[in-house]
Image (cartoon, rainbow, N blue to C red):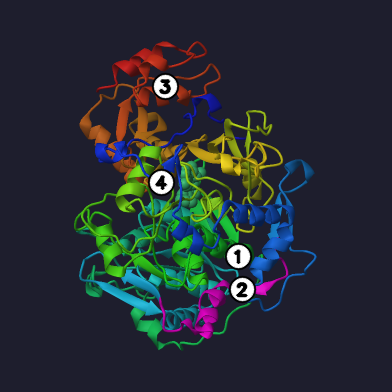
């Protein structure tokens, strides 16, 4: 059955967003901007003039065509890529998003034969970009950096692809990649794509347990990792984590006979690395021996490109599956327009390739555009909080794409031209800080709303086209039809708040959950029949700037994302299911029951707040608290560790036994005067007990 949804009335009112930013300077807040009218922030004329989409009129023209004639619109876009054979012109796409009409199914460019690695590399080298830098690498420590031109990247990718073929990896085989932000990470993704293998990158902050879970689910031909990585001052022995995961997976019958290990000598010498002869192979010992040319495996547009596990409302991660053709066309196009990308740009996205942002907007989107892109291994606050701006100045970054949780200090940042934001709602005051301080009131902000499932941007500013509203992701990208529905799934028009759904498909949409098409339908297409349900709440403001009103139907307007309405939380851009954290807590022998909610957090957007009921007779102690937190770190990863454990003699439940999270959210955020109706609780006393334990 569909997961229960949080009520619309409990969603933040418009405009809303994550917590307030404490380091926001009051002076900046108070400053009225010259270019700002009625809360609208206009791009400068100079900016608009040079932009791909220079005006609202142009946007509307393109958008309307994309909705009225999706096949024609996307065919034209797709024709700019290399296809060995084209799709049938009368069959650009086919879709069924309505569970009442049969299985959900989405296809784009089916029958078209291509290869995304070829389009990222060979095509760019052939068109004269061979000596252009494709990837700069900036290491964790200040002294370490490197770069690869498009030709060099093609050679490296081809060598690895030849190795993979040599050991028997074939089209359709899964490859698990557990690597930090080394150049070898995008190299590995591209090498898999080149031979038609399906990469599944696991963020290198996940624990052995989480890694094992993913290995067991997709049964890869091999695992690719490195021996260790430095994060800030700490060395993390990644290979040991892989070793532990492989022990676990073999216990359930999934045994891996090849583990390719990159020696990251800057973090750890190979002599210190634990090793299993016969299974483990040093990357540096084999890969350089392979030829730098490798024939491409041509694949159908609908052949799988990658699997990426993400969190949902239940404990089991979902293997989001993206296919080749539509994803290629969509990531490239969204990148180009949302960032107004030009060949003279230097682009930096701070995301890790272990998340979708790193797939679509570190690796594929930029390289498909022939862009120069920075891969950053380190942490934004190491060796100090100026690191990001140091990097911006060092590489003369013009487009900077990040989560709205970073600090700014003394650097010039003159090179910046566009700022991007992602991962959580950015509230208007944070928006102004980003705009005024980081961008010197000069750079438009692309607040891009999207998801692992959507492949690419869905609601996003086109920076030269529209005046912006602080905190609003503005309007849908070409081909995307967002709708806001009420509890019953009825579309609401005009100024409103509700559940955000999407009507119709777009090329970048995910096609299934790996091995579980039923869960795909149940989670995303059954809650509101006929639509894709995003899991987010959204407010829409129908009032538009006067000058554009005539061009819009009444139901169009600026969009404000108001956060998840299901049991998923976003901590510093990392997506975590509350059920996953709960099951990790409950695995602790002294924990009887746990309920986890997200609370606003000043820096992380949301923090994890856990209510824990201990087994009978167990006394509360700090030690126990720490060991509960440790259980979560061990089972999921450090990023999922609860910020707070709240002792709970009992949990507020309905008579049918359902935990009322609405009440827990209120208690967690200290809104005690406003608990709402508690009369349907099986035991209303529980609430007072919880409040009494608030400060323990
Ligand atoms: C969830 C998807 C895809 C980017 C990284 C996260 C939230 C994402 C925004 C934004 C408000 C946002 C939503 C969404 N989110 N971008 N610009 N404004 N909220 O990907 O891990 O799949 O998480 O992130 O809640 O559902 P993800």
Q: Earlier in the sequence, mark 3 or mark 1?
A: 1
Badge 4 element: loop
Q: Is residue 95 visible?
A: yes
Q: Around disc 4, counting alpha carbons within 10 Å, would you say few (fewer than 14), some (14 to 19), or many (20 or more)?
A: few
Q: Say whether disc 1 or disc 4 marks the residue closer to the N-terminus.
A: 4
Whether residue 219 is visible, yes or no, is no
Q: Which residue is mark 4?
A: 35
Reading the image, the residue beneath label 3 is 651
**What's the magenta region?**
108-133
Judging by the rendered image, the residue that carries numbered circle 2 is: 81
Distance from mark 1 CB to nearest ligand 1 atom below 8 Å: no
The N terminus lies in quadrant:
top right
Vertical relation: 60 (above or below) 364: above
- Mark 4 Cβ inside 8 Å of ligand 1: no
Q: Nearer the viewer, mark 1 or mark 4?
A: 4
Towards the viewer: 436 or 220: 436
For residue 177, above or below residue 423: below
What secondary structure is marked by label 2?
loop
Find the distance from the CA under tag 3 to the CA under tag 1: 48 Å
Q: Between residues 662 and 505, which one lies in front from this camera angle?
A: 505
């Amino acid at each position: 059955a569909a997961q229960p949804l949080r009520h619309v009335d409990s969603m933040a009112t418009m405009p809303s967003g994550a917590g307030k930013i404490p380091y926001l300077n009051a002076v900046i807040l108070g400053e009225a901007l010259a270019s700002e009218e009625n809360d609208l922030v206009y791009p400068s004329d100079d900016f608009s003039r040079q932009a791909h989409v220079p005006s609202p009129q142009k946007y509307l023209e393109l958008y309307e065509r994309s909705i009225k004639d999706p096949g024609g619109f996307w065919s034209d876009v797709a024709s700019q890529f290399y296809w060995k054979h084209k799709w049938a012109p009368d069959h650009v796409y086919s879709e069924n998003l309505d569970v009442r009409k049969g299985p959900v199914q989405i296809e784009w460019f089916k029958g078209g034969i291509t290869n995304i690695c070829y389009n990222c590399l060979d095509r760019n080298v052939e068109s004269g970009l061979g000596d252009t830098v494709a990837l700069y690498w900036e290491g964790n420590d200040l002294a370490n950096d490197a770069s690869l031109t498009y030709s060099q990247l093609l050679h490296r990718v081809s060598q690895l692809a030849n190795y993979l073929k040599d050991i028997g990896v074939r089209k359709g085989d899964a490859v698990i990649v557990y690597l930090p932000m080394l150049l070898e990470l995008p190299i590995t993704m591209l090498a898999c794509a080149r031979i038609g293998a399906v990469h599944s990158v696991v963020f290198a902050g996940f624990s052995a347990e989480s890694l094992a879970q993913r290995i067991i689910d997709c049964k890869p031909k091999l695992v690719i990792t490195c021996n260790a990585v430095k994060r800030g001052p700490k060395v993390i022995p990644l290979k040991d984590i892989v070793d532990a995961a492989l022990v676990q997976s073999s216990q359930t019958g999934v045994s891996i006979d090849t583990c390719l290990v990159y020696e990251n000598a800057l973090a750890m010498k190979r002599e210190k690395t634990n090793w299993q002869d016969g299974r483990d192979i040093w990357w540096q010992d084999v890969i350089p021996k392979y030829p730098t040319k490798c024939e491409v495996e041509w694949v159908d547009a609908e052949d799988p490109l990658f699997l990426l596990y993400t969190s949902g409302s239940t404990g089991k991660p979902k293997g989001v599956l993206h296919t080749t053709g539509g994803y290629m066309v969509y990531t490239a196009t969204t990148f180009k327009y949302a960032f107004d990308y030009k060949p003279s740009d230097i682009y930096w996205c701070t995301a890790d390739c272990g998340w979708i942002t790193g797939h679509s907007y570190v690796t594929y989107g930029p390289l498909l555009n022939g862009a120069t892109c920075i891969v950053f291994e380190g942490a934004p606050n190491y060796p100090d909080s100026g690191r990001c701006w140091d990097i911006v100045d060092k590489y003369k970054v013009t487009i900077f794409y990040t989560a709205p949780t970073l600090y700014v200090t003394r650097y010039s940042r003159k090179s910046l031209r566009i700022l991007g934001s992602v991962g959580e709602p950015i509230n208007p005051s944070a928006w102004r800080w980003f705009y005024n301080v980081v961008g010197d009131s000069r750079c438009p902000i692309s607040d891009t709303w999207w998801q692992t499932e959507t492949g690419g941007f869905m609601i996003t500013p086109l920076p030269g086209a529209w005046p912006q509203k602080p905190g609003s992701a503005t309007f849908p990208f070409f081909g995307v039809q967002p709708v806001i529905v009420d509890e019953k799934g009825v579309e609401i028009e005009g100024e409103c708040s509700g559940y955000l759904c999407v009507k119709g498909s777009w090329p970048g949409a995910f096609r299934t959950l790996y091995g579980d098409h039923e869960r795909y339908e149940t989670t995303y297409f059954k809650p509101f029949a006929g639509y894709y349900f995003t899991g987010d709440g959204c407010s829409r403001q129908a009032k538009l700037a006067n000058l554009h009103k005539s061009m819009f139907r009444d139901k169009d307007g600026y969009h404000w994302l108001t956060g998840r309405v299901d049991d998923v939380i976003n901590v510093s851009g990392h997506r975590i299911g509350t059920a996953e954290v709960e099951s990790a807590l409950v695995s602790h022998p002294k924990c009887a029951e746990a309920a986890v909610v997200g609370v606003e957090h000043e820096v992380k957007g949301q923090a994890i707040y856990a209510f824990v009921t201990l087994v009978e007779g167990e006394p509360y102690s700090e030690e126990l608290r720490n060991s509960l937190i440790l259980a979560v770190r061990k089972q999921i990863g450090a990023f999922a560790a609860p910020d707070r454990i709240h002792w709970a003699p009992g949990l507020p439940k309905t008579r049918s036994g359902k935990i009322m999270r609405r009440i827990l959210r209120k208690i967690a955020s200290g809104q005690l005067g406003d608990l709402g109706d508690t009369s349907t609780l099986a035991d209303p006393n529980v609430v007072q007990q919880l409040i009494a334990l608030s400060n323990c």
